[in-house]
Amino acid sequence: MNVILTYDLSGSNGPVKSTMIANGYSKTFISNGNIINLPETTLFHPHKTPSQALIDIQNSARNHGVRVTRAIATELFGTIWDALPGEVLR
């Protein structure tokens, strides 16, 4: 179900993001042949629901001793959207 998740944390994002990536989330996705590089605290998953994504980020944050201060997850495709593909985050 192509879900996009964006979130803010009370602490460091690095370990949380690494755990999410290890669990199948991605910093990029491909649309119309273009690689879309997502902002720092935004991830994509091709097979999760928005509810599952919110549970995943909360669990990952908790496991790393931080909390999610805000988050939103939505189905990406099938809605009207546009993007600036951006540069690859280092």
Image: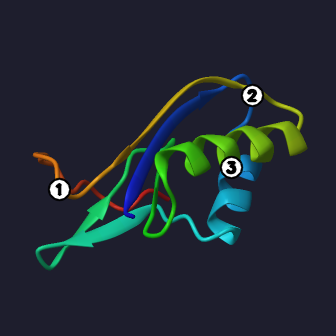
Q: Residue 58 or 9: which is nearer the viewer?
A: 58
Secondary structure of residue under mark 2: loop
Task: Please give left or right for residue 30 compared with residue 74 in the image.
Answer: left
Residue 59, quarter of the rendered image: top right
Q: Which residue is mark 3?
A: 56
Q: Is residue 50 above or below residue 7?
A: below
Q: Can you tell which mark lies on residue 67?
A: none
Mark sitting earlier along the chain (3/1):
3
Q: Nearer the viewer, mark 3 or mark 1?
A: 1
Mark sitting earlier along the chain (1/2):
2
Q: Can you tell which mark lies on residue 78?
A: 1
Q: Label 3 to label 1, Cα distance in Å?
A: 23 Å
Residue 52: x, y in percent?
A: 60, 50
Give amino acid for label 3: Asp
Q: Which residue is mark 2?
A: 11
Q: Label 1 to label 2, Cα distance in Å?
A: 33 Å
* Residue drawn at the location 39% of the way across and 45% of the way down: 39
